[in-house]
Each structure stands twice: as structure tokens, then as C-alpha cells.
Amino acid sequence: MTIYDMVNDNAPMAGAAVYAWHCDAQGNYSMYSDGVEDETWLRGVQVTDDSGVVEFTSIVPGCYSGRWTHIHFEVYPDLDSITDSTNAIATSQMAFPQDVLDSVYELDDYDGSAENLSQITLETDNIFSDDNAELQMVTISGDTDAGYIASLDVYVDTSTEPSSGGTAPTDGGGEMPSGDMPSGDMPSGDMPEPQTSASAS
């Protein structure tokens, strides 16, 4: 992701902290899904470089019922502010193009994702159905053998008053209730160390 400061003529935002999180191949979220409430996998924090860039290494998320495949992220003004989710100045999600998902969801690890994806479109998704969906779609290259590289330009209004992120789901499973979004709250005492590149497994 490249983070841009809209207030400063869309200049790259150096020193911003980005927290990203998503589900595993079966639609489960660490910290929230049954049996993994004490886990923090597929979550990470990075700090933007002088070009406003952060890089994460992860997997393609699975598709659970009722949602288009996505990765959640929050942007914070700096690393010190990320210990409190109410300091987030931007909360959003990135979407994946269907042709990539169709290829990934042929893999055995993603059992059920193809069926879930077939029951929803970007237009019927409760997050991506707004007029800004195209701004949340990643640019992506690669294949299932070599892996994919996805990128997204994120424009942040840095004059935004910090506010809390999304609401954690209450059922804790892959079948999340429509409209609920996992929280950006960091696990107490377990904030991932920021690095120049992160691995999530």
C-alpha cells in the first residue's frame, strides 16, 4: 500500500502506521473465531517509508458467506498512536478481482470459498457496494504458483478526527453476520513489531 496525505497535496505520508488483518482460507479470524481467540495470525503492523509505502506478506483470504473477499486495514498518524484503535484516522478494506479469486479458490485449502463467492457480487456486498468500491480494488499480478503482488493507493484525509474502527463479530465463526466487521483493536500487550516487510501465516 502507498499512503497519501490529502491535506498535504497528496504527498506520500511518511511515518504512518498501518494495521492490516484478514481471515484465513476457511474464513476464520484470529482473536475472534472459535478456538483461536488467543491467536494473532494474519494480522500485522507496518510503518510507511519516506515514499509512503508499506509491504505485507500474507495469503489470499478465503471467502466466507455474505462478504466479498477482502483485507481490513486502518491508518494511524504514527507508530505511537497505534496502541489505541480510537486513534485511527482511516479505516477501510481492500477488495480482490474475481479472476484472481476464481484461480485461488480452485486450491484445496480454500474449500467452500468458490461457492461463497458465487453467491455475492461487489454490487451486493454491504461494504463494497458504495460508490467508492473501485478505490478499494487492488491492482494485482502473478499466479497461484509464483504468488501474487497486490497494490493499492490509499488517500487519507489527515484532518480526520480519530475514531474507533469496526465492531467485532459476536458469533466468532467463519459465518459472520452481515454488516459486522472485525475490530481493529490490537491484542493487549501483543502488538506485532513493525518491520520493513512482514510475514503472516
Image (tube, helix red, strand yellow):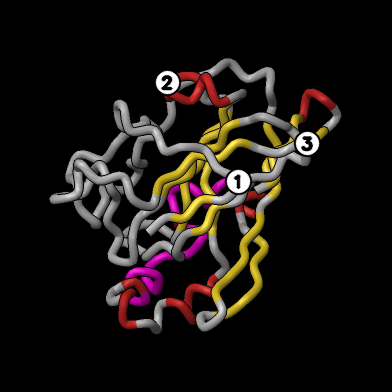
Left or right of 189 on screen, residue 14: right
> Where does label 2 land, which residue?
84
Choose top left, top right, bottom left or bottom right for residue 7. top right
Which is nearer the N-term, disc 2 or disc 3? 3
| Residue at the extreme left | 35
Q: Pick whichever, 179 or 191, lies toward us.
A: 191
- Percent from the top left, x then y, of residue 200? 42, 55
Decide: is 78 above or below 35.
above
Is residue 124 magenta-colored? yes
Left or right of 39 on screen, residue 121: right
Q: Which amino acid, mark 3?
A: Pro
Highlighted range, magenta = 114-130
- Percent from the top left, x then y, of residue 128? 52, 51
- Percent from the top left, x then y, of residue 14? 72, 32
> Where does label 3 land, which residue?
12
- Percent from the top left, x then y, of residue 96? 54, 63
Left or right of 73 on screen, residue 42: left
Q: Residue at x 36, y 35 (%)?
A: 183
Q: Nearer the viewer, mark 1 or mark 2?
A: 1
> Where does label 1 land, which residue?
196
